Structure formats: structure tokens, C-alpha cells
Image (tube, grey):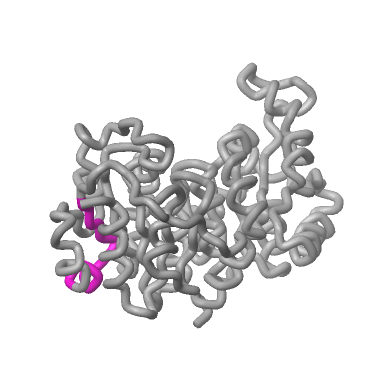
Amino acid sequence: MLRADAVRQVVEALPDDHLLVACNGMIGREVFTARDRESTFYMIGSMGLALSIGLGVAQCRPDRQVVVLDGDGNVLMGAGVLATAAALAPENLHHVVLDNEAHGSTGDQRTVSDVVPLEAMAKAAGYVSAERVDAEDLAKVMPAFLAKKGPALLLAKVDKGNQHGIARVTHTPPEITARFSRAIAG
Amino acid sequence: MPQSQRFLAALEANGYDWFGGVPCSLLRGVIRRFDNEPRWGYVSAVREDSAVGLAAGAAMAGRQPVVFMQNSGLGVCVNALVSLNAIYEIPSLLVISWRGEGGKDAPEHIVMGDIMKPMLDLMNVPSRVLSADTLEDDVAWTAATIRETRLPAALIVPKGILDAAS
């Protein structure tokens, strides 16, 4: 399954009140194309920090559900943050990783997630749960995953390659900040 | 009142209510207080840029964050500060120790001690060197600056102000 199709399954499964932090690169653009919501923070730069940002929100607002949508390159770049998430242990943090074993936004150069299982890293760090599912099953398993106690990780392997016609996020970064802050405030 | 307690009281009086970072021996007094007093909710981050990311999340959740780091960590934070805080207009107070001040320190601190201030200037992060004589004014200046710019500001902490263990 192409990553854009997996992204669509994930964002379509999100209840309206769930906050989403989407990592930089094609994933954020695919989220924007599939379903633009005020409650999505599109991180267009600062690679590796999506989990940190989501964790900061989840920690400050335990009454809100926070989902981080990451890629394997982002998880590996910010791998130490898996430990911080496990240590702070916010029950309201759900981490979805779409793993194509490549830096898909820069030309599909390989990462190392073909030999290093990221769900095992999260589990070893101390996530309450970390599981791998087939991308074809994402839509089906998302509700049960989101009902789990966090920090929880769900990883699906996806194919390399980008779908044509994926737009850049048209909101300016300050607009994204303002929208997301409003959505958090409720 | 011990200086670290005075500093935290000043931060609190100016509305700062989220604390995280990576320690430095020059910030030892404050970090020890965080470790001993869980009410501050200090987050021990794995890297300085991760602390900046956590603080960005906290800021968007309505908090007024403070990130503590050694100046070596400023190098780690460059991309977070310019491709997250600067373009998204997300504020944060950076409390950065000044290792290598005046070229007198261990070799690994000399270059960063020299270029830290120009680096902050280059990134358009307004900064002030913290002084024990003007500590409350310095902290109030950061809060006023951040209210005005909605961007990060920095306090540079020289040796001898916040490193006491008390």
C-alpha cells in the first residue's frame, strides 16, 4: 500500500476531537490532502520533533487525546524521545508510524528500519504497547488502538514511492499555530 | 534566599509555568531544586532540541515554557529554533549557561563560548546576560520581550549565579 493511502486510513479514523501532530515531509502533505482539520499541527520543518511536540501537548492537556503521525526517518532521528514519552507515560498519547524504510520526501534513500524494528524500540523504551499491523488493516484496527492506554505505538509497513498530486500545506506556519492552539483550547 | 530559589520565584512571578531541558553544571542549583521539588514538573529531556519541541507543544497548549540548557545545546537546537519556533511564531524562554566565557574553560567549550551570542543574534533571538544584581529585572525583561514578539528569548547564565548547590 502506498503511504498516502495509509495516511488517509489513519486520518479518516480519527474522531473529531482528537488532536493530530503530523511529521514533516510527504506525510504532513498527505494528511493535508486527505483531510485538513484545525486540530492538526503540520510540522513542516524541524525533522525528528513531531513526537516531542505531541508529547508536550499531551503532557499539558491530559484531558485531550493526542495522536502523532510519524515516519521511520522521523522516529529514528528523534529516537531518544521514545524514552521521554515512555518516562512521562501520558495515557492520552498515541503514536502511529508509517514505515517505508526510506526517506520518502528526498528520493527514497534507505533508512535502517528494514533491520531495526521501531516497534521493538518503543516497547523496549517502555511504551505501554507497541504493535505492528498490516497497512491493509489500519482502518479496521485504529478505533481499538486509540482506545488503548498510552503511550501506545502502532506501526504499519508501507510501500516506497509518492502518490502524484499531493499538495503542499497552504496554511502559513503562524496560521497553523493559531488554529492548533485554538483547537487545543477547545 | 538562595539564588536558584530567587530565580525560580522570579520565573513564576512572570507567569512561566512549564520547565524542561538538559542540565549544565552552571545551572546545577536550579536543576537540583527541580529534582527535589516535583511540583515544578520539570521534564528531563534527552536532547536540547527535543526540549524545545516539548516546550513548543506546551506553548500551543497555553503554557509559558522555559527550556534550560548548556550553551553546547544551543548548537543542537539551531534547526528547531529556526524551522519551528521562528516560522511558526512559537515563544519560549531559553536559559542558556555560558561555558567558555572569556576563553577560560575546558577546550570543548571555548568556541561555543565565543560564538553563542552572535549565534543568538543571527537567529534573531533577543538575549540578555543574567546578573545577580538585576535578576528580577532580567527575568521580567524576558517576559515582556516574549509578550511583544511571540518568539523565543534567551537569558545567558554566567558562572557563579545558579551553580551553587543550595
Is A176 above or below relative to B46? below
> Which residue ends up furthest to the bottom in the rendered image?
A186
A13 on left or right of B16: left
Q: Residue at x 16, y 52 (%)?
A: A132
Residue A115 falls within the magenta-colored stretch: no
Residue A51, how many percent across, how many down?
41, 54
Residue A148 falls within the magenta-colored stretch: yes
Residue A136, how many percent across, how many down?
15, 59
**Near-viewer residue (B151 or B129):** B151
Q: Residue at x 39, y 61 (%)?
A: A31
Count of marks placed on residues: 0
> Which residue ends up furthest to the top in the rendered image?
B107
Q: Residue at x 46, y 67 (%)?
A: A40
Quadrant hosting residue A181: bottom right
> Which residue ends up furthest to the front in the rendered image?
A165
Residue B92, how many percent across, how many down?
65, 57
Q: Is residue B44 visible?
A: yes
Residue A30, how many percent across, how many down?
39, 57
A86 on left or right of A173: left
Query: Quick one: quadrant of the N terminus of chain B?
Result: bottom right
B35 on left or right of B152: left
Quadrant hosting residue B9: bottom right
Q: Is residue B36 visible?
A: no
Is B3 above or below relative to B17? above
Q: Residue at x 31, y 33 (%)?
A: A111
Quadrant hosting residue A129: bottom left
- Magenta stretch bounds: A144-156
